[in-house]
Amino acid sequence: MPGLTSGLPNYGDAGFSEYLRRAFIKGAGYSDEALERPLIGVVNTYSAYNPCHGNVPQLIDAVRRGVELAGGLALDFPTISLHESFTAPTTMYLRNLMSMDTEEMIRAQPMDAVVLIGGCDKTVPAQLMGAVSTGVPAIQLVTGSMLTGSFRGRTVGACTDCRSLWAQYRAGELDEAGVWEANNELVGSVGTCSVMGTASTMACLTEALGVALPGSASAPATTAARRRIAEATGRTAVALASSGTTLDSILTPAAFHNAVRLLGAIGGSTNAAVHLAALAGRLGFGFDLDALDAILRDTPVLVDLRPAGVHYMSDLHRAGGVPEVMRRIADLLDLSAAVVTGQTLGAELDAIAPVPGDDVIRSRERPVHTGGSLVVLRGNLAPDGAVLKQSAASPELLEHTGRAVVFADSADLASRIDDPDLDVRPDDVLVLRNIGPVGAPGMPEAGYIPIPRKLAAQGVHDMVRISDGRMSGTAFGTIVLHCAPEAARGGTIGLVHDGDTIRLSAAERRLELLVDAGELARRRSEYSFDPDLASRGYRRLYEQHVTQADQGADFDFLRRRPGGIQVPPRL
Ligand code: FES
Ligand code: MG
């Protein structure tokens, strides 16, 4: 029988369990008739600290309406909520905790299916990672993007323009009054960042993975469309409760292939490589970064959104959203992949009318970029891989050899980057280490190393920058990220000295420290890294169990035992 006894152990006999649970929930005024319906859990990640989820109460209302229209009963329940700007030391540090919270609360409480409502960067990955192991049917609903604003006649949005306006201010091109005037306009409403950052990227990928309704990713947070999508998601959850379709039957290798294709076509965030690897691990799949590179290499970037392009998420929505992007790369997708609606991806795309246009979503004849939006680099600086968002880099820096200027950690960077006496030239390579999963801890988005103030003042806007950390999906520049292994785990990035020569070749997918092996061995023998490891609590758990970036920075004990399948398949 569905409902209050679903998946739970009994108190005494089964009849008494039902009797007891009904008695308690009737304390909230429910009737027996309401309690005999399929029970749909709704994850409530509303928090006053999380404006990206500020519309969650309205979405829960709409989901509930959809559930009730389809004959179910919706009960929402809280989990932790993570906003990028209000979570120290970094949301990535807490993504795994959120996934555990999500998994355990879905397991702990009776429900026949669950609606995962989330949006801010780490939320969607955390919710999918958590729900996938529960065996409870689940569907993802994203909160939708925020409105854009306007500053002195130009459209602005979080948080690519936060960065570019601040960089202008640092360079003396914008005064203090101006930069604060713009501050009121950067975040136009509740909802997630309005550019193709990590939140938008992961929202789009939910459609390619098949775990959200087709067309559901792009409607802005404050629109009527967003609420109708929530209502439809609630209806679908009731259907999932009766079919019993779980996420692991949807998240097949074909789904990962399609997700990587879409990641390329939207020019999505580097963080997706980490989150997809973590999700793959929860399913027992190995994650093949070289296959990701190969798939992206022949996937054209068609979506022209900031940070790499010019438009915003609301423009993508009006241009047809993810279904239109997928239609234009349909020959590159596995259209037989399953969708949470019970249809194939191909059937879903056929059912949605095409939207003409060649501006926000380009035609195949006029791509924004070719040759791989992201590239995976290897070499002695990153034997287990590093990632560079080629489409957001300066083309002239993609093949570059330069002198290393090394920062030992974020504190060292903060204390010296603006020092007028810093020995740095425009063609140098900035290296920041100890911002990896263990080193920081939590692999913060500190890889967007600022241009030293004295160079910025001379008009230098980009330099090759390398780290073992991550970067916000809303940032841009020739920035090499996720060097694995990280310095705190013995990676070569910990052995770079000021003045060494580093060679980056995006074309060859190489990242080399041009120091001979004997010298590196000598440095390694002298190197001692003494991280300040925690003695208790979540931080101790984190430091002892977090994996490297190429494995998704997930906890080793949350991964399913690998079954030998590698994703994404090249097809
Ligand atoms: Fe939440 Fe950007 S801060 S999506
Ligand atoms: Mg972000």
Image: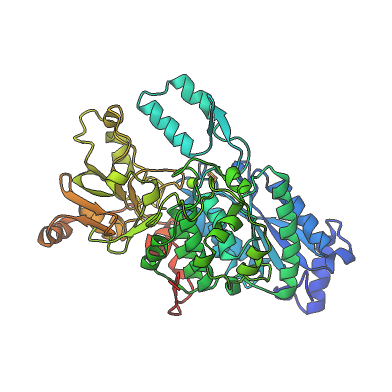
Is residue 125 positioned above or below 559 on the image? above
Q: Nearer the viewer, residue 470 or 487?
A: 470
Scheme of colours in the image: rainbow
Where, by quadrant of the figure, is residue 354 drawn?
bottom right
Give residue 67's quadrant in the image: bottom right
Left or right of residue 66, residue 130 in this image: left
Task: Tell me the residue at 48%/22% (across/down).
Answer: 178
Q: Nearer the viewer, residue 443 or 294?
A: 294
Position of the N terminus, as image quadrant, is bottom right
Q: Is residue 101 visible?
A: no
- Quadrant into which the C terminus falls: bottom left
Q: Which x, y percent locates residue 7?
A: 70, 74
Q: Quadrant of ligand 1?
A: top right
The answer to whether any part of residue 507 appears in the image is yes
Q: What count of labels does the image hold?
A: 0
Query: Is residue 409 positioned above or below 301 on the image?
Result: above
Q: Position of residue 447 (x, y in %)?
A: 36, 46
Which picture quadrant has residue 564? bottom left
Q: Residue at x 29, y 55 (%)?
A: 506
Which residue, as the protein is rendered here, is positioned at the far front? 365
Identified at 64% across, 72% down, the residue is 246
Is 170 displayed left or right of 98 in the figure?
Answer: left
Percent position of residue 17, x then y: 78, 73
Relative height, residue 478 to residue 12 (above, below): above
Spot occupied by residue 516 in the image (x, y as percentages of width and height):
12, 59
Q: Is residue 42 left or right of residue 285?
A: right
Determine whether, in the image, residue 130 is placed left or right of residue 32. Answer: left
